Image: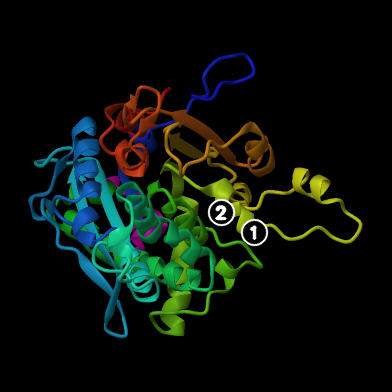
């Protein structure tokens, strides 16, 4: 855990704290690099739904029966599946609920899977289809398989295909908004007492009126940052792809902007923010030495846009970014004091806290399972789940 100058631990709020005076909380989840079919994440038995159940159990919330095993819905472009989503609703009391916990899960990996398999010429196991693949040494084959399946995703995302992925997630959130608005209306009809407790009309956009917490895996942190808080002048601000008409897109963008203002905390299960920032760095101007340019580099990542939220929500506390890291994860970065100084200086409206945990054992100090050390490992880690739910206050 990060410490303050006096040696005490930095504190952060958990999901329980984010209910506050509001009777509802929306938790949005998305995945990172790798192969993530909807069935593995957002469908019954998927990792994200299992995490939802464990979070709800700690909060003593019960799932409404019709959401016990939700069906995933496809996001299509020209008849081809490029993403998916699912929604669920939990309440604190099935007879007389006073609080509601909404979970939404969105995927975009269906799009990158098609690209990887076609352009890298991979089989169903993400191995090359070339005639010499069988001669590759076992460990080397596993390493190459990882590169093919997982590390190709950030390359795809920071390139020209990034706007397509962002649009897929935007569309997913727009459909989640419609689905959860419908779910909320159904709750109000079933439990009329909730109308008096709700601070926003039941007909108002769900994502624009409900406090939100975000749980992201790996590369998914950057994807959601770019979708919810696009920075002026960046490719994320000027994406060309649209899965619906201009009028619908304008309404969707307005809802997303308001949704971004509703976010209370982001819990990142592994992240590559400093690594992906390298793609944003511009060369030094004439007469500026490269070493000095690198040392004085401004914030190159979406936290710059997050910090600007302070002007939009002056009465709200600082937005908290909680970065979970396993020291044995080869694809995660601790957000250093220098990173914080650049991207979250005092008064910026953004607070960054690192939480370092161990997801898997190290064998004789030589090796720890890289997959278990990465994002999915935190979903099985009771300490990590406890921090997400309770914080450390």
Location of residue 362 in the rendering, given as x and y in whole percent from the top left corner: 35, 26
What residue is disc 2 on?
Answer: 276
> Residue reaching furthest right?
287
Q: Which numbered circle lies on residue 295?
A: none
In the rendered view of the protein, which quadrant contains the C terminus? top left
Q: Visible in this render: residue 388? A: yes
Quarter of the figure with residue 178: bottom left
Q: Tell me if mark 2 has few (under 14), some (14-19) or many (20+) residues whose alpha carbon lies within 10 angstroms of its own.
A: some
23 is higher (above) or lower (below) than 11: below
Location of residue 368 in the rendering, given as x and y in whole percent from the top left corner: 35, 32
Does the stretch in magenta take in 201? yes
Q: Which residues are magenta?
A: 197-209
327 is higher (above) or lower (below) than 202: above
Q: Secondary structure at mark 2?
A: helix
- Quick one: 313 or 128, which is closer to the camera? 128
Mark-to-mark CA distance, 2 and 1: 8 Å
Quarter of the figure with residue 358: top left
Q: Secondary structure at mark 1?
A: helix
What residue is disc 1 on?
Answer: 280
**Residue drawn at the location 33% of the way across and 26% of the way down:** 363
**Residue drawn at the location 62% of the way across and 66% of the way down:** 234
Whether label 2 touches label 1, CB < 8 Å: yes
Location of residue 197 in the rendering, given as x and y in whole percent from the top left corner: 28, 45
Q: Determine whether, in the image, residue 81 is placed left or right of residue 120.
A: left
């Amino acid at each position: 855990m990060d410490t303050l100058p006096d040696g005490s631990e930095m504190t952060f709020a958990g999901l329980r704290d984010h209910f506050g005076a509001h009777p509802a909380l929306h938790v949005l989840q998305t995945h990172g690099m790798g192969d993530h079919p909807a069935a593995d994440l957002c469908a019954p038995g998927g990792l994200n739904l299992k995490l939802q159940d464990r979070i709800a159990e700690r909060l003593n919330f019960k799932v409404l029966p019709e959401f016990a095993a939700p069906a995933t819905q496809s996001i299509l472009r020209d008849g081809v599946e490029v993403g998916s989503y699912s929604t669920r609703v939990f309440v604190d009391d099935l007879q007389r609920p006073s609080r509601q916990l909404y979970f939404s899960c969105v995927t975009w990996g269906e799009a990158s899977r098609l690209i990887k398999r076609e352009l890298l010429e991979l089989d169903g196991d993400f191995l090359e289809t070339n005639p010499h693949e069988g001669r590759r040494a076992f460990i080397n084959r596993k390493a190459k398989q990882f590169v093919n399946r997982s590390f190709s995703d950030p390359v795809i995302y920071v390139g020209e295909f990034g706007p397509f992925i962002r649009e897929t997630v935007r569309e997913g959130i727009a459909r989640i908004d419609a689905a959860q608005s419908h779910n909320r209306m159904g709750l109000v009809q079933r439990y009329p007492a909730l109308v008096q407790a709700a601070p926003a009309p039941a007909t108002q956009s769900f994502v624009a009126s409900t406090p939100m917490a975000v749980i992201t895996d790996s590369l998914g942190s950057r994807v959601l940052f770019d979708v919810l808080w696009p920075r002026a002048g960046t490719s994320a601000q000027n994406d060309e792809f649209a899965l619906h008409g201009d009028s619908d897109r304008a309404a969707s963008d307005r809802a997303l902007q308001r949704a971004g203002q509703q976010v209370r905390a982001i819990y990142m299960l592994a992240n590559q923010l400093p690594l992906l920032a390298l793609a944003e760095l511009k060369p030094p101007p004439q007469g500026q030495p490269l070493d000095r340019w690198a040392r004085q580099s401004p914030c190159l990542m979406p936290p710059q846009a997050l910090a600007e939220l302070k002007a939009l929500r002056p009465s709200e506390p600082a937005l908290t970014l909680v970065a979970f890291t396993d020291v044995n994860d080869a694809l995660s970065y601790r957000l250093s004091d220098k990173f914080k100084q650049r991207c979250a200086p005092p008064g910026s409206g953004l607070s960054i806290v690192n939480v370092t945990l161990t997801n898997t054992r190290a064998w004789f100090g030589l090796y720890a399972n890289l997959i278990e050390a990465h994002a999915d490992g935190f979903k099985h880690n009771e300490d990590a789940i406890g921090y997400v739910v309770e914080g450390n206050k």
